[in-house]
Image (spheres, coloured by chain):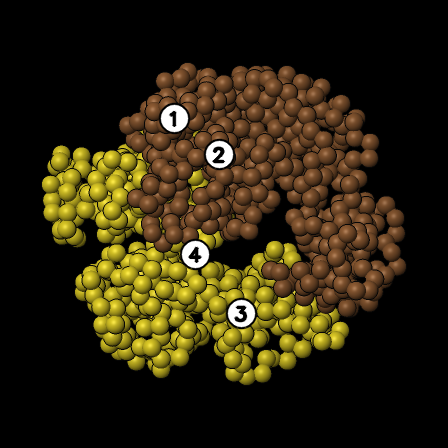
Chain colours: A brown, B yellow
Amino acid sequence: MGIRGEVEGAQAEIRRRNLSRLLQELHVSRPLSRSELAARLHLDRSTVASLVSELAARRIVQERRRSKSIPQSPGRPSPVVELRADGPGALAVDLATDWMGAAVVGLGGKVMASTRRDVSLCNSQPEKVVEDLGALVRPLLASLENGPRIVAIGVSVPGLVRSGDGHVHEAPALGWRDVPIRELIRDEFQDLNVPVFVGNDADLATSAEHLRGSGRGTTDFICIWGEGGLGAGIVVDGRLLAGSAGYAGEVGHVTVDPDGDLCHCGARGCLESVVGEEALLRRSGRDPLGGTAALEDLIGAADRGDQAALSALAESGRGLGIGIAGLVNIFNPNRVSLGGLYARVYPYVRAPILRELEKRAMPAPRAMVDLVTVRLGANALLLGAAELALAPLLNDPAIMPLQQEPAPNDAIDTAEALASAAHGMLAQG
Amino acid sequence: MGIRGEVEGAQAEIRRRNLSRLLQELHVSRPLSRSELAARLHLDRSTVASLVSELAARRIVQERRRSKSIPQSPGRPSPVVELRADGPGALAVDLATDWMGAAVVGLGGKVMASTRRDVSLCNSQPEKVVEDLGALVRPLLASLENGPRIVAIGVSVPGLVRSGDGHVHEAPALGWRDVPIRELIRDEFQDLNVPVFVGNDADLATSAEHLRGSGRGTTDFICIWGEGGLGAGIVVDGRLLAGSAGYAGEVGHVTVDPDGDLCHCGARGCLESVVGEEALLRRSGRDPLGGTAALEDLIGAADRGDQAALSALAESGRGLGIGIAGLVNIFNPNRVSLGGLYARVYPYVRAPILRELEKRAMPAPRAMVDLVTVRLGANALLLGAAELALAPLLNDPAIMPLQQEPAPNDAIDTAEALASAAHGMLAQG
């Protein structure tokens, strides 16, 4: 490759990065004017114009005048760049213990349509589950006329997922072991002809909460999810903790009481066996496998001041506090957020959790951590699965084909574009 | 700034990054020829020549012919680029419970000279400690005629250090609270006129082990240190876990037995209070504060097959295994390394640790983790403190002044240098 080729290669790579940065900004923010984009990305306006023009030609963004209801400074209002409703999107799939759900999610985390079927997937045949999923999803896809073009599928699974190939190593809640779920789903939706990405449910929901919910603006963030078992997602310095193979974050199976009750995993005194849904129901005198109905009954009893219910909840709060104190000592997070079961019983477990934090977390990290509940509700899993699916597009928007020639303002001086683009990239990194 | 200025700015920034990459490579590797450097850094040879020439002009590296004892391919042997013995270096300081140590460490982690004074720093006056440190270090600095030029001071402290300003929030082992140690040391060594960096002892020793010892080649690595208390350093995806303010990694104060013995920190059943040195000595019937002598006595008894000593060690191994299993579930590391006390008693604690891992760690992450002992010995703390001090130089070698004009081969074509340099940088990121 000659000198010209090398210059062009470097220039193309810098441009790809800046396209990605601009699209990411729109993805997590709101419609922005070109000058707002230039300021946020440390790029000059001509580079932003060129990047916007390319994203428009790939039918990812469009420009429109700001609506007149928003107060403007005098003069002609500048147009804003926004994500197209018919731009690229993901099919997000959520396989849970008691349901399967799916949604079409556009860039910007917009749920365009969703569907769900309440059905136990416990000890189910993976092939049958994927076939049923196909039947559930087809009408959803057919219903979207001017919706997003599906460019990838993201799948949430309650289990250990190998990050390299989306293989489900083990999903005890489903009774699955060594299931090539990525291949099964790719085959079922082969007419879509898009890549499939698989992630752990707690990880995916946490990444959605970090991006758009209770973890927004934090660098170090922990979500603890109580849905059947106890899962967690951990964000370290802005990135989801994966571990060497994607198995990190199994907080539910950290020992908090070495001689405690036997856990499903075979060990004794795991956090999950001490404070999971089953332990809470058992402690309150209810059927440990009573599920949602038993939980609602328990919460109703607590609301009426029933002492047995209150003390069972307080005991769960204490165990949860012991676990959270350990995580605060290990991770020094800005914020810990409770989801699922723990968000619903938050008023009853908050005080005992804070008491254990006071006793067991080191003063310095304890002083800086907030305890909150999740904010995205049931959508967190689907939004997280969509993030996983859209990550390659966000990383390289040029994977979307050009639908038209970029506007002529794209043809700006090469040296200027390269210099400005490189500057912007370096200011970022 | 005009177009020319922007191009030059971007070019300078890309060059700084490549200078940094080349120096980092020599820092962790060995003397390398220009073509080896070009291959490892994905740069062309003319760029490498230009970078080497600049580092030589800043008196950081030099080139020499390979010695003839190394077998060579036929033809004239190519010279290797090596770090200069009289190049930049750090003054590394280790303030521990029972000693203060210092060393002059060159790039490449080479300890040029070191000194140590055995003295209890428990409940000592920080001002007095720093004054004594000055008296200890002056002869060391005076002894180095052709040694490195000291460009920074790195300090290891057994306590919580705020990463922003090197303030010691709390160092219970020293009885320190809110000590501005960075300012004290800067004042003591103001004639050196160099910046001072302060870090937590376990973090610093772990970063040294990761770079040059038992963690080399791993992405996710945990070191557990038993020196007085129990500390840990955790490497996540190649980087030391810091947390939102630098307080992360306090594994010693994670609860593993909620109603266990009282810990120094005021909580019950912390890992440190279950398996720390004091707990081990107490369990074996020895004075918990007996220190090194009591430990040697305990190990001697175990070597002779003394049952009480063996069972006390096995019990510590069990507790340690419970803690490590939790960390394996949380972090999915490639490797866990034991240091300090735990390295010395490794033959006696290995089996019980592995038993608990078998029982309590999830099969998938357990299957991929190695258990080993540290390799750098007593130098780990000083090497880690030196890494902390040298990080700004490694990040921007141009902070060292030019001592001469770069060699004329530096004057290569601007467009080629920019393109090649940008390519190399992008290949890296």
Which amino acid, by three-letter code, is at mark 4? Ala
C-alpha gap between disc 2 and disc 1 = 19 Å
| Image coords of residue A18 (percent x, y) | 70, 57
Tag 1 subunit: A
Which amino acid, by three-letter code, is at mark 1? Gly
Nearer to the camera, A58 or A374: A374
Residue lying at 57% horizontally and 61% vertically, measured from the top left = B36
In the drawing, does residue A133 fall left or right of residue A330?
right
Q: Are marks 4 and 2 on the same chain?
A: no
Q: Are marks 3 and 2 on the same chain?
A: no
> Residue B396, labelled with which disc?
3
Residue lying at 75% horizontally and 23% vertically, measured from the top left = A138
- Numbered disc 3: secondary structure: loop
Residue lying at 73% horizontally and 55% vertically, measured from the top left = A32
Please indicate, yes or no, whether residue B376 appears anywhere in the rendered image: no
Front of the two marks 4 and 1: 1
Front of the two marks 3 and 4: 4
C-alpha gap between disc 4 and disc 2 = 27 Å
Q: Callout 3 environment at 10 Å: few (<14), some (14 to 19), or many (20+)?
A: some
Q: How many marks?
A: 4
Up the image or down, A134 lies above or below A195; here it is above
Residue with the mark numbered 2: A343
Residue with the mark numbered 4: B245
Residue with the mark numbered 1: A305
Q: Callout 4 environment at 10 Å: few (<14), some (14 to 19), or many (20+)?
A: some
Residue lying at 41% horizontally and 33% vertically, measured from the top left = A348
- Circles 4 and 1: CB atoms closer than 8 Å: no
Q: Are marks 3 and 1 on the same chain?
A: no
C-alpha gap between disc 4 and disc 1 = 41 Å
